[in-house]
């Protein structure tokens, strides 16, 4: 059966632009400084080894450092996100390929930005890239809540809630992502999936085929895989 008008769910960082070039290193530094102060004794910040251990623990347990910080340290999510995404000159840090706006205009169907980045940051990046007019909806991490609790990607609960809000079947949606964990959950729920590898080091992963219907180096290559993504 043909799906002429799919709904595209686009990730942002390392999918539509190269966040690893400068933005992710800056965010990591900001997070480390925040955690060092948070984990310190009030006089001295915690040492680097302690900070790294806590970050890894929260990432492994919750899928996001943010969730661990909020749960265990009585920190407001918006405060942590604001401090983690402080940049002297964000526009100078953004690196992306040309032709993204043309690609989004060319793809049939509705496009929604679905990012674990905070709204202010992701809004700035998308406007800088000139892509904001192509997205009918912008869902940032602050809006990823289920029963009032933060449930960012790869939360299956939030994805189910989103599908219900959109009033669509999972098979009508295509998730475009660089993160296999997010793709894996989406695939299990019945979404079509596209893995973007160009901005991340593609580690050997014997099960990646179970997560992605197509694998592309760049989102600019999505159109050539249209038959596999939105035709049945």
Image (cartoon, grey):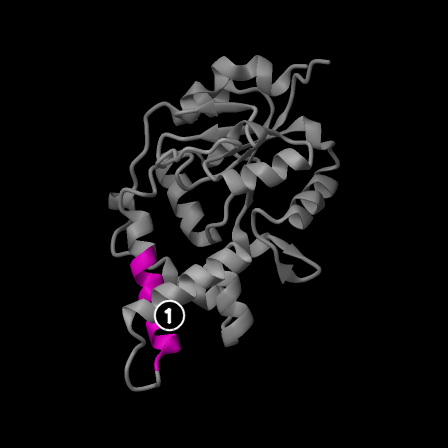
Label 1, residues with CA under 10 Å away: few <14, some 14-19, many ≥20: many
- Residue 83 in view of the camera: no
Residue under label 1: 35
Q: Give the range drawn in magenta.
A: 28-40
Is 212 contained in the magenta span? no
Query: Relative to 183, does residue 30 appear above or below in the rendering?
Result: below
The chief SS type of the magenta part is: helix
Q: Residue at x 42, y 60 (%)?
A: 56
Answer left or right for 226 relative to 102. right
Q: Quadrant of residue 185?
A: top right
Q: Whole-percent x and y of residue 208?
A: 51, 31
User: Magenta segment: does it hold 31?
Assistant: yes
* 27 lies left or right of 108: left
x and y, in percent, of residue 198 in the image: 36, 30
Residue depicted at 41% across the width and 42% down the height: 13
Q: Is residue 2 above or below residue 44?
A: above
Q: Is residue 145 left or right of residue 68?
A: right
Residue 116 spot, x, y in % from top left: 50, 49
- Residue 171 is situated, as x and y percent measured from the top left of the image, at 69, 27
> Which residue, as the protein is rendered here, is positioned at the far front?
206
Q: Residue 86: name its quadrant.
A: bottom left
Closest to the observer, 195 or 125: 195
> 231 and 166: which one is in front?
231
Dividing the image into 4 quarters, which one contains the N terminus?
top right
In which image quadrant can residue 40 be found?
bottom left
Residue at left 63%, top 56%?
145
From what the image shows, is residue 108 above or below residue 50? above
Identify which residue is drawn at 47% across, 57% down.
59
Q: How many labels does the image show?
A: 1
Label 1, secondary structure: give it.
helix
């Amino acid at each position: 059966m043909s799906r002429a008008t799919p709904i595209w769910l686009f990730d942002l960082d390392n999918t539509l632009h190269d966040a690893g070039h400068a933005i992710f290193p800056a965010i990591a530094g900001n997070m480390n400084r925040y955690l060092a102060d948070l984990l310190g004794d009030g006089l001295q910040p915690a040492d680097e080894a302690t900070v790294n251990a806590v970050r890894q623990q929260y990432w492994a347990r919750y899928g996001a450092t943010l969730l661990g910080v909020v749960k265990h340290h009585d920190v407001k999510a918006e405060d942590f996100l604001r401090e983690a995404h402080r940049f002297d000159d964000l526009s100078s840090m953004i690196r992306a390929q040309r032709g993204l706006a043309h690609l989004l205009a060319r793809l049939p169907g509705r496009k929604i930005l679905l990012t674990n980045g905070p709204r202010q940051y992701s809004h700035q990046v998308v406007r800088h890239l000139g892509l904001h007019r192509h997205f009918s909806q912008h869902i940032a991490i602050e809006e990823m809540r289920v029963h009032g609790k933060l449930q960012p990607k790869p939360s299956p609960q939030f994805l189910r809630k989103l599908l219900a809000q959109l009033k669509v079947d999972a098979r009508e949606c295509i998730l475009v992502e660089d993160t296999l964990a997010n793709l894996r959950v989406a695939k299990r729920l019945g979404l079509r999936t596209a893995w973007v590898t160009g901005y991340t080091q593609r580690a050997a992963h014997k099960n990646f085929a179970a997560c992605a219907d197509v694998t592309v180096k760049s989102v600019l290559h999505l159109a050539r895989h249209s038959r596999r993504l939105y035709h049945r």
